[in-house]
Image (spheres, grey):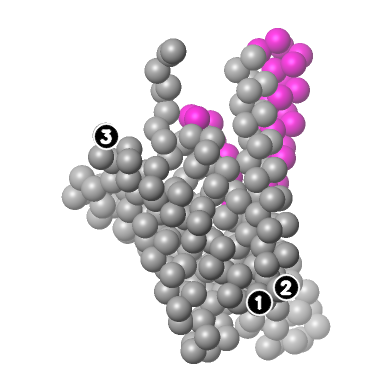
Amino acid sequence: MPKKDYRIFEGLRVASCLTFISGYLNAFTYITQGGRFAGVQSGNVISLAFYFAQGDWRQVINFFIPIYFFVIGQFFTYLAKKWFVSKQLPWHFSSSFIMLCLVLITILLSPIMPPFFTIALLAFVASIQVETFRHLRGVPYANVMMTGNVKNAAYLWFKGVVEKDLALKKTGRNIFLTILSFMVGVVVSTLLSFRFHEYALIGLLFPLLFINYHLWQEKKA
Protein backbone atom coordinates (compact mmCIF):
# COMPACT_ATOMS: atom_id res chain seq x y z
CA MET A 1 0.00 0.00 0.00
CA PRO A 2 1.48 3.41 -0.93
CA LYS A 3 2.26 5.71 1.93
CA LYS A 4 -0.16 8.58 2.31
CA ASP A 5 1.35 12.01 1.66
CA TYR A 6 -0.80 13.95 4.10
CA ARG A 7 -1.10 14.25 7.87
CA ILE A 8 -4.03 13.02 9.97
CA PHE A 9 -5.40 16.54 10.36
CA GLU A 10 -5.81 16.63 6.56
CA GLY A 11 -7.54 13.25 6.43
CA LEU A 12 -11.11 12.71 5.30
CA ARG A 13 -12.27 11.46 8.70
CA VAL A 14 -11.06 14.58 10.49
CA ALA A 15 -12.38 16.87 7.73
CA SER A 16 -15.79 15.19 7.86
CA CYS A 17 -15.88 15.57 11.65
CA LEU A 18 -14.96 19.24 11.34
CA THR A 19 -17.72 19.99 8.83
CA PHE A 20 -20.15 17.99 11.00
CA ILE A 21 -19.12 20.21 13.93
CA SER A 22 -19.64 23.31 11.82
CA GLY A 23 -23.08 22.25 10.63
CA TYR A 24 -24.02 21.29 14.19
CA LEU A 25 -22.68 24.52 15.65
CA ASN A 26 -24.35 26.83 13.14
CA ALA A 27 -27.74 25.09 13.41
CA PHE A 28 -27.46 25.16 17.19
CA THR A 29 -26.76 28.89 17.38
CA TYR A 30 -29.37 29.68 14.73
CA ILE A 31 -32.05 27.91 16.76
CA THR A 32 -31.00 28.86 20.29
CA GLN A 33 -29.31 32.24 19.72
CA GLY A 34 -31.93 34.25 17.87
CA GLY A 35 -31.10 33.36 14.28
CA ARG A 36 -27.38 34.10 14.61
CA PHE A 37 -24.60 31.89 13.26
CA ALA A 38 -21.39 30.95 15.06
CA GLY A 39 -19.41 30.44 11.87
CA VAL A 40 -21.35 31.54 8.79
CA GLN A 41 -20.56 35.23 9.09
CA SER A 42 -22.13 36.02 5.70
CA GLY A 43 -25.52 35.33 7.29
CA ASN A 44 -24.70 37.56 10.26
CA VAL A 45 -23.49 40.37 8.00
CA ILE A 46 -26.68 40.21 5.91
CA SER A 47 -28.86 40.30 9.04
CA LEU A 48 -26.83 43.14 10.54
CA ALA A 49 -27.23 45.23 7.38
CA PHE A 50 -30.93 44.30 7.16
CA TYR A 51 -31.65 45.55 10.68
CA PHE A 52 -29.37 48.54 10.21
CA ALA A 53 -31.53 49.61 7.27
CA GLN A 54 -34.57 49.41 9.54
CA GLY A 55 -32.89 51.27 12.38
CA ASP A 56 -33.27 48.33 14.77
CA TRP A 57 -30.11 48.99 16.78
CA ARG A 58 -30.70 46.24 19.32
CA GLN A 59 -30.63 43.64 16.56
CA VAL A 60 -27.66 45.35 14.90
CA ILE A 61 -25.71 44.86 18.14
CA ASN A 62 -26.96 41.27 18.49
CA PHE A 63 -25.62 40.33 15.04
CA PHE A 64 -22.44 42.34 15.51
CA ILE A 65 -21.42 40.21 18.51
CA PRO A 66 -20.61 36.96 16.62
CA ILE A 67 -18.87 38.91 13.84
CA TYR A 68 -16.71 40.74 16.39
CA PHE A 69 -15.71 37.59 18.27
CA PHE A 70 -15.02 35.74 15.01
CA VAL A 71 -12.57 38.54 14.13
CA ILE A 72 -10.97 38.35 17.59
CA GLY A 73 -10.65 34.61 17.04
CA GLN A 74 -8.51 35.27 13.97
CA PHE A 75 -6.19 37.51 15.99
CA PHE A 76 -5.95 34.85 18.69
CA THR A 77 -5.29 32.03 16.20
CA TYR A 78 -2.44 33.91 14.54
CA LEU A 79 -0.73 34.67 17.85
CA ALA A 80 -1.38 31.23 19.35
CA LYS A 81 -0.05 29.40 16.29
CA LYS A 82 3.04 31.58 16.26
CA TRP A 83 3.69 30.78 19.93
CA PHE A 84 3.06 27.02 19.67
CA VAL A 85 5.24 26.70 16.57
CA SER A 86 8.06 28.68 18.22
CA LYS A 87 7.95 26.22 21.13
CA GLN A 88 7.89 23.28 18.69
CA LEU A 89 4.51 22.15 20.01
CA PRO A 90 1.95 20.43 17.72
CA TRP A 91 -0.30 23.23 16.53
CA HIS A 92 -3.22 21.24 15.11
CA PHE A 93 -3.61 19.08 18.20
CA SER A 94 -3.20 22.14 20.45
CA SER A 95 -5.82 24.05 18.47
CA SER A 96 -8.33 21.20 18.60
CA PHE A 97 -7.74 20.86 22.35
CA ILE A 98 -8.35 24.61 22.82
CA MET A 99 -11.61 24.24 20.87
CA LEU A 100 -12.66 21.33 23.10
CA CYS A 101 -11.91 23.32 26.27
CA LEU A 102 -13.83 26.36 25.03
CA VAL A 103 -16.88 24.24 24.17
CA LEU A 104 -16.73 22.65 27.63
CA ILE A 105 -16.56 26.11 29.22
CA THR A 106 -19.55 27.21 27.15
CA ILE A 107 -21.58 24.16 28.20
CA LEU A 108 -20.80 24.70 31.87
CA LEU A 109 -21.20 28.48 32.06
CA SER A 110 -24.00 29.24 29.59
CA PRO A 111 -26.77 28.69 32.18
CA ILE A 112 -25.31 31.34 34.50
CA MET A 113 -23.73 33.80 32.05
CA PRO A 114 -25.34 36.72 30.15
CA PRO A 115 -27.16 35.87 26.86
CA PHE A 116 -24.33 37.07 24.58
CA PHE A 117 -21.80 34.69 26.19
CA THR A 118 -22.76 31.56 24.24
CA ILE A 119 -22.77 33.06 20.75
CA ALA A 120 -19.58 35.03 21.45
CA LEU A 121 -17.57 32.03 22.62
CA LEU A 122 -18.86 29.70 19.90
CA ALA A 123 -18.06 32.26 17.18
CA PHE A 124 -14.56 32.37 18.66
CA VAL A 125 -14.35 28.55 18.43
CA ALA A 126 -15.55 28.57 14.81
CA SER A 127 -12.92 31.16 13.96
CA ILE A 128 -10.14 28.99 15.38
CA GLN A 129 -11.43 25.98 13.47
CA VAL A 130 -11.68 27.65 10.07
CA GLU A 131 -8.15 29.05 10.25
CA THR A 132 -6.45 25.96 11.70
CA PHE A 133 -7.80 23.23 9.43
CA ARG A 134 -7.63 24.36 5.81
CA HIS A 135 -6.62 21.35 3.73
CA LEU A 136 -8.18 18.01 2.85
CA ARG A 137 -5.52 15.57 1.64
CA GLY A 138 -3.42 18.47 0.40
CA VAL A 139 -6.30 20.32 -1.28
CA PRO A 140 -7.75 23.58 0.14
CA TYR A 141 -11.30 23.34 1.47
CA ALA A 142 -13.54 25.17 3.93
CA ASN A 143 -14.88 23.49 7.05
CA VAL A 144 -17.18 26.26 8.31
CA MET A 145 -18.83 27.74 5.19
CA MET A 146 -19.90 25.51 2.31
CA THR A 147 -20.12 27.87 -0.70
CA GLY A 148 -16.53 27.23 -1.79
CA ASN A 149 -16.90 23.50 -1.16
CA VAL A 150 -20.00 23.25 -3.35
CA LYS A 151 -18.17 25.08 -6.14
CA ASN A 152 -14.97 23.05 -5.80
CA ALA A 153 -16.71 19.69 -5.51
CA ALA A 154 -18.68 20.30 -8.69
CA TYR A 155 -15.80 21.82 -10.65
CA LEU A 156 -13.12 19.30 -9.69
CA TRP A 157 -15.34 16.26 -10.13
CA PHE A 158 -16.62 17.39 -13.52
CA LYS A 159 -13.12 18.36 -14.65
CA GLY A 160 -11.94 14.91 -13.61
CA VAL A 161 -14.71 13.26 -15.63
CA VAL A 162 -14.00 15.32 -18.75
CA GLU A 163 -10.22 14.92 -18.52
CA LYS A 164 -10.41 11.31 -17.29
CA ASP A 165 -8.39 12.26 -14.22
CA LEU A 166 -9.13 9.86 -11.37
CA ALA A 167 -7.35 12.02 -8.78
CA LEU A 168 -9.54 15.05 -9.57
CA LYS A 169 -12.70 12.97 -9.43
CA LYS A 170 -11.64 11.57 -6.06
CA THR A 171 -10.90 15.05 -4.72
CA GLY A 172 -14.31 16.29 -5.87
CA ARG A 173 -15.92 13.28 -4.22
CA ASN A 174 -14.07 13.88 -0.94
CA ILE A 175 -15.16 17.51 -0.81
CA PHE A 176 -18.73 16.42 -1.54
CA LEU A 177 -18.53 14.05 1.44
CA THR A 178 -17.57 16.96 3.70
CA ILE A 179 -20.66 18.83 2.47
CA LEU A 180 -22.76 15.77 3.29
CA SER A 181 -21.30 15.57 6.80
CA PHE A 182 -22.07 19.29 7.26
CA MET A 183 -25.70 18.56 6.37
CA VAL A 184 -25.81 15.62 8.78
CA GLY A 185 -24.51 17.95 11.50
CA VAL A 186 -27.30 20.41 10.75
CA VAL A 187 -29.96 17.67 10.88
CA VAL A 188 -28.70 16.17 14.15
CA SER A 189 -28.30 19.59 15.77
CA THR A 190 -31.76 20.72 14.68
CA LEU A 191 -33.41 17.65 16.19
CA LEU A 192 -31.47 17.93 19.45
CA SER A 193 -31.67 21.73 19.77
CA PHE A 194 -35.45 21.84 19.50
CA ARG A 195 -35.67 19.08 22.09
CA PHE A 196 -32.93 20.00 24.56
CA HIS A 197 -32.29 23.68 23.74
CA GLU A 198 -28.87 24.87 24.99
CA TYR A 199 -28.09 21.46 26.50
CA ALA A 200 -27.85 20.15 22.91
CA LEU A 201 -24.37 21.69 22.80
CA ILE A 202 -23.17 18.61 24.71
CA GLY A 203 -23.48 16.71 21.42
CA LEU A 204 -20.45 18.58 20.08
CA LEU A 205 -18.18 16.84 22.56
CA PHE A 206 -18.26 13.52 20.71
CA PRO A 207 -16.77 14.67 17.36
CA LEU A 208 -14.36 16.99 19.18
CA LEU A 209 -13.10 14.12 21.34
CA PHE A 210 -12.76 11.96 18.23
CA ILE A 211 -10.58 14.59 16.52
CA ASN A 212 -8.47 15.17 19.63
CA TYR A 213 -7.91 11.45 20.08
CA HIS A 214 -6.67 10.94 16.50
CA LEU A 215 -4.43 14.01 16.57
CA TRP A 216 -3.00 12.89 19.91
CA GLN A 217 -2.30 9.43 18.46
CA GLU A 218 -0.41 11.02 15.57
CA LYS A 219 1.50 13.22 18.00
CA LYS A 220 2.67 10.16 19.94
CA ALA A 221 3.67 8.24 16.79
* Residue depicted at 47% across the width and 55% down the height: 208
Chain-order first, disc 3 or disc 2: 2
Which residue bears the numbered disc 3? 221
Amino acid type, mark 2: Phe
Q: Check the picture and name the quadrant holding the N terminus.
A: top left
Which residue bears the numbered disc 2? 194
In the rendered structure, which segment of residues is drawn in magenta? Answer: 137-165
- Marks 2 and 1 in Cβ contact (< 8 Å): yes
* Residue depicted at 73% across the width and 65% down the height: 191
Q: Please indicate, yes or no, whether residue 116 appears anywhere in the rendered image.
A: yes
Amino acid type, mark 3: Ala
Crowd class of label 3 (few under 14; some 14 to 19; many from 20; radius 10 Å) = few
Question: Does 97 sit left or right of 192 as displayed?
Answer: left
* SS assignment at label 2: helix
Q: Please indicate, yes or no, whether residue 69 appears anywhere in the rendered image.
A: no
CA distance for labels 2 and 1: 6 Å
